[in-house]
Image (cartoon, rainbow, N blue to C red):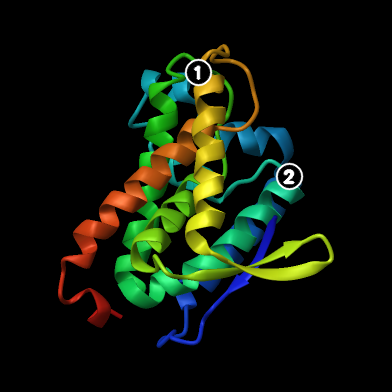
Amino acid sequence: MFPIGDDNSSRRIFPIVTYVLIALNVLFFFVELSGGEPFIVKWAFVPSRFLANPSGDFITLFTSMFMHGGWLHLAGNMLYLWIFGDNVEDRFGHVVFTIFYILCGLAATFAQLAFSVGSTVPNLGASGAIAGVLGAYLVLFPQGRVSVLMGRGIVPMPALVVIGLWIVLQFFSGIGSIAETADTGGVAYMAHIGGFIAGFLLTFILRGNRRMSAAR
């Protein structure tokens, strides 16, 4: 089940922030490739290093959001951001969506930190922030439908099913990953869960702001 698009017929504004975020992630990935391992170690978020020197490592809270572990990691994240980000940005407005995205990314990082305080493994990726976007999408578009590639055909499915299956997988995988050692590399499932919960809750707060849809 591979999502490839959703309904954009009600979109009112051009999603410039979503496209800029995609461009920045791609650009940063090329810089990451050219910089190699030293670049990753310097700019990724390392839990134990951050706790030892929060002020000196503060910038990695943000730079790590634009780094990826490989082409598939980048492509998967950007696909989800492209499908769901534009609609959420349309409801929030450019400025609020930018702040929302960053807050979800930070929440994701701290959620992962809570379960890996002694880890020396670099944490990187936009997955946590994008998980927040998925949480917002569920709140804002509960009846939304997503085009999904299944086998050789394209099938429209409720967003609740597509995103719901994704977050269930993250929860079960996250529970399993807690049992692993802090220095085991792999997928930061707790970051996905933390970002999703942050996005879900923040959307209820932002949706209560009558000026939200007017913010551009």
For marks 2 and 1, give the one nearer the viewer. Answer: 1
Position of 146 with respect to 206 (left or right) is right
Figure quadrant of the N terminus: bottom right
Q: Earlier in the sequence, mark 2 or mark 1?
A: 2
Residue 106 visible? The answer is no
Relative to 147, say whether 63 is above or below.
above
The one nearer the camera, 216 or 177, is: 177
Estimate the x, y position of residue 31 in percent, counting from the top left. Answer: 68, 52
Q: Residue at x 63, y 18 (%)?
A: 184
Relative to 113, say whether 159 is above or below.
below
Q: Mark 1 sits on what residue?
A: 178
Q: Mark 2 sits on what residue?
A: 70
Amino acid type at mark 2: Gly
Relative to 99, say whether 12 is above or below.
below
| Mark 2: few/some/many CA within 10 Å (<14, 14-19, 20+) | few
Q: Residue at x 43, y 86 (%)?
A: 10
Position of 104 with respect to 45 (left or right) is left
